Image (cartoon, helix red, strand yellow):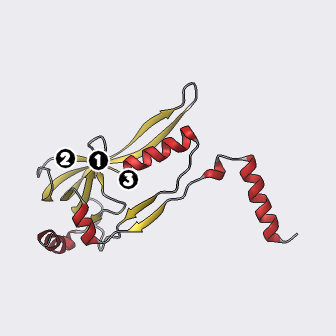
Amino acid sequence: MSDNVMKIALVVILCLVFPREGRVSRIHYKSIELDKLVHVATLIAVVKPVAGGERQQEIRLAKPGDSYYPFQFIVSTMTIVKVLRGEAIAGENVEVYPADFDSQVELHRKYYLEGISKSPIYQKYEPVSRPQEGEQYIVFLRRTKDGHWSFFCLGAGEGLDQLSTITELLKSR
């Protein structure tokens, strides 16, 4: 038997022996451009991360009489320095949940409680410049179903050197 046939046979056997692991989903990303991100974000603001302001949280999901399957995530606390668009007050602290938070919780629930695996397509922004840790930067946020702020998409932050470009995009809207 050829090496390729042996490898395929091994994968099939492993999927039969370990069916849950055979259903692992894959996450796909679709790029979003800055002008589109400026157009769709609910809140665009210059923020400063709060020192020690990141904390891990978890949501416990469980089947009756079964062990629980925690969904773990990081919440970041930031101080609003300047609002470029949206409803927020300069000087207030906001807690920001991860990008695609609602979808990720739902996919986690479906996978562990229902055995359903889906491969989502999320948007991703590639910033022109990344701030140094602790520096002010510009964020693009939206609300979750529960009213929390979350990053609009993965990478939804931009360095202050892009402030004039973002301001011009906001004016042209």
Can residue 87 be seen at all in this image of the molecule? yes
User: Which numbered disc flags the more N-terminal residue, 1 or 3?
Assistant: 1
Q: Considering the numbered disc 2 on the image, is that residue within a helix, a strand or a loop?
A: strand
In the rendered image, which residue does mark 1 sit on? 53
Q: Amino acid at mark 2?
A: Asn
User: Which numbered disc flags the more N-terminal residue, 1 or 2?
Assistant: 1
Position in image of residue 100 (x %, y %): 37, 53
User: Quick one: 92 or 63, which is closer to the camera?
Assistant: 63
Mark seen at residue 7 = none
Mark seen at residue 93 = 2
Q: Would you say 51 lies left or right of 2 here?
A: left
Give the distance between the C-alpha atoms of the residues marked 1 and 3, in whole angstroms.
20 Å
Residue at left offset 34%, top offset 67%: 125
Q: Quadrant of residue 105?
A: top left
Give the distance between the C-alpha atoms of the residues marked 1 and 2, in whole angstroms.
10 Å
Q: Considering the numbered disc 3 on the image, is that residue within a helix, a strand or a loop?
A: loop
Position in image of residue 84 (x %, y %): 13, 61
Which residue extends farthest top? Answer: 65
Give the distance between the C-alpha atoms of the residues marked 3 and 2, in whole angstroms.
21 Å
Residue at left offset 14%, top offset 59%: 85
Q: How many marks?
A: 3
Q: Given this view, does label 1 or label 3 mark the residue nearer the observer?
A: 3
